[in-house]
Amino acid sequence: MSRPKTRTALAMLSIPVGIALTGYLISSSLQLGQLLRIDLASYAVPSAGLAIALVCAILLMAGRVRIARRIVILYLVLSAADLVAGVALLVAGLTSYTGGEGGTRLLLDSVLLWLSNIQIFALIYWTLDAALWSPTGVGRRRHFFFPQHVDKLPGYETWEPSLFSYVYLAFTISTTYGPTDMPATSDTAKALAMVQAIIALALFTLTIARAVAIIG
């Protein structure tokens, strides 16, 4: 079991842990089960996602990259569905948050969903773009170009973006509504960036603004 594989697996697992924590803290009325009208415990989806991510990390450490990628995709589908459900339920139920306590709860739920948005899309971009997933260990097609690739900076000739690079990418999209110094080159990457930006925009303009207004 090589150290690079272990570090990669632990880094990958840190994001599902963060997503699970936000899932545990968010209001139960914003869970995926509420949208599907399924009677699920509030911790069911975050716990299931964490279990799937743990299996994936173990497979990565064992060198089973192809199987691990399939499991990551399964995890991302579940997490993205939970995120979209949470945002949709939050926007639809804005009027149910009233009073100072309701405004504080709305602000907390909005921030938690905003953090989930960053974490989930960071993992999506990493799964889509990272060289780890190609059979030769070298990216065959880049969906995002980082400054180190475009400008051919000295000392970065063999540089490959880490998972944190994609966290930074997702953070910039959620705060500026588009990639800044890391342009999306493929249609898939552009579409994903648009979806992430729309979610972030909805959370900022609709929910967080209303929460501040209620509290104020």
Image (tube, grey):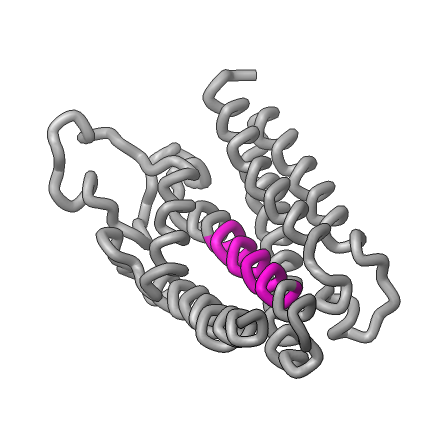
Q: Is residue 32 left or right of residue 75?
A: right
Position in image of residue 65 (x %, y %): 54, 35
Inspect this view and state whether residue 104 appears.
yes
Is 151 above or below relative to 5? below
Residue 119 colored magenta?
Answer: yes
Quarter of the image where one finds residue 143: bottom left
Q: For the magenta stretch, what is the residue range?
A: 105-121
Q: Is residue 11 left or right of residue 159?
A: right
Q: Residue at x 39, y 69 (%)?
A: 194
Position in image of residue 132 (x %, y %): 43, 36
Q: Residue at x 56, y 27 (%)?
A: 63
Number of marks = 0
Assign the magenta stretch its main secondary structure: helix
Inspect this view and state whether residue 195 appears.
no
Q: Nearer the viewer, residue 5 or 63?
A: 5
Position in image of residue 12 (x %, y %): 54, 37
Position in image of residue 25 (x %, y %): 70, 52
Is 14 above or below relative to 25? above
Q: Is residue 167 left or right of residue 7?
A: left
Q: Residue at x 63, y 57 (%)?
A: 79
Q: Residue furthest front?
A: 216
Is 141 above or below relative to 192? above
